[in-house]
Image: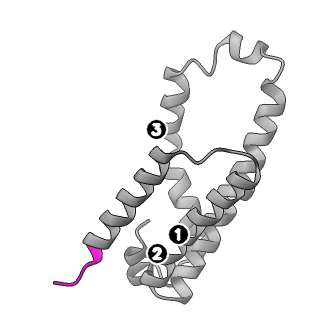
Amino acid sequence: ANVNIIKRYLQEVKAIAIAAGNFAAIIVPAFFVLVFTNFFSRETYANPDFAMSLVYLIILSAFGTALAKVLFNKLVQISTPVFASSVTYLMTIVAVGWGLLDGERFTMIQALATILILLGVFLANKRN
C-alpha cells in the first residue's frame, strides 16, 4: 500500500494486517505467473536443486520480504511518509553494499541507471 494511504487511512490497522492484505492481493497474479512459466511441470520438480531452492525461497520470503514489509508499515505509522520513503533509498544503498561485499559487479550501466533514477526522484520532488 502507498505510504500516504497507510498513514492517513490505515493508522489504526496493525502493520501485520496491512502486510497480509498486500500479499493476499498478489496471490492470484503470482499463481498465474507460476502456471505460465511451467513451474508446475515434472521437469521443475525433477531438478535435484528444486527442494533446496524452495527452502531458500521460503526463508527469503519470510525474513527478507514479509518481515521487512511489516516493519516498513510500522515505520510509516510511527513516523511520516516522507521519512519512511527516504528509508527505502537507504535500503537500496545497503543492498548494493552487500552485493559488492559478496563479489558481485557494479557496472557502468548500473551506475548510469542509478543516476537516472535519482535524477527522476529529484525532479519529481523539486519544489516549483
Q: Amino acid at mark 2?
A: Ser
Q: Is residue 103 above or below residue 37?
A: below
Q: Which residue is mark 3?
A: 29
Sequence-wise, the earlier of marks 3 and 1 is: 3
Give x and y (percent) for residue 29. Answer: 46, 38
Q: Which residues are magenta?
A: 124-128
Q: Secondary structure at mark 2?
A: helix
Q: The C terminus appears in which quarter of the rendering?
A: bottom left
Magenta stretch mostly in which secondary structure? loop
On the image, which quarter does residue 3 sit in? bottom left
Closer-to-camera residue (17/3) = 3
Q: Amino acid at mark 1?
A: Thr
Give x and y (percent) for residue 104. Answer: 68, 45
Q: Is residue 61 above or below residue 128?
A: above
Question: Which residue is located at x 62 percent, y 22 percent?
Answer: 39
Measured Cα–Cα span from mark 3 to mark 1 = 25 Å
Measured Cα–Cα span from mark 3 to mark 2 = 26 Å
Q: Secondary structure at mark 3?
A: helix
Question: Which residue is located at x 58 percent, y 81 percent?
Answer: 75
Q: Secondary structure at mark 1?
A: helix
Question: Which residue is located at x 51 percent, y 69 percent?
Answer: 89
For disc 1, the neighbor class at 10 Å (few under 14, some 14 to 19, many from 20) is: few
Marker disc for residue 85: 2
Instruction: Kindly indicate whether the residue at mark 1 contacts the one at mark 2 (C-beta within 8 angstroms).
Output: yes
Sequence-wise, the earlier of marks 3 and 2 is: 3
Camera-near label (3 vs 1) is 1
Q: Is residue 19 above or below residue 32?
A: below
Closer-to-camera residue (68/115) = 115
Marker disc for residue 88: 1
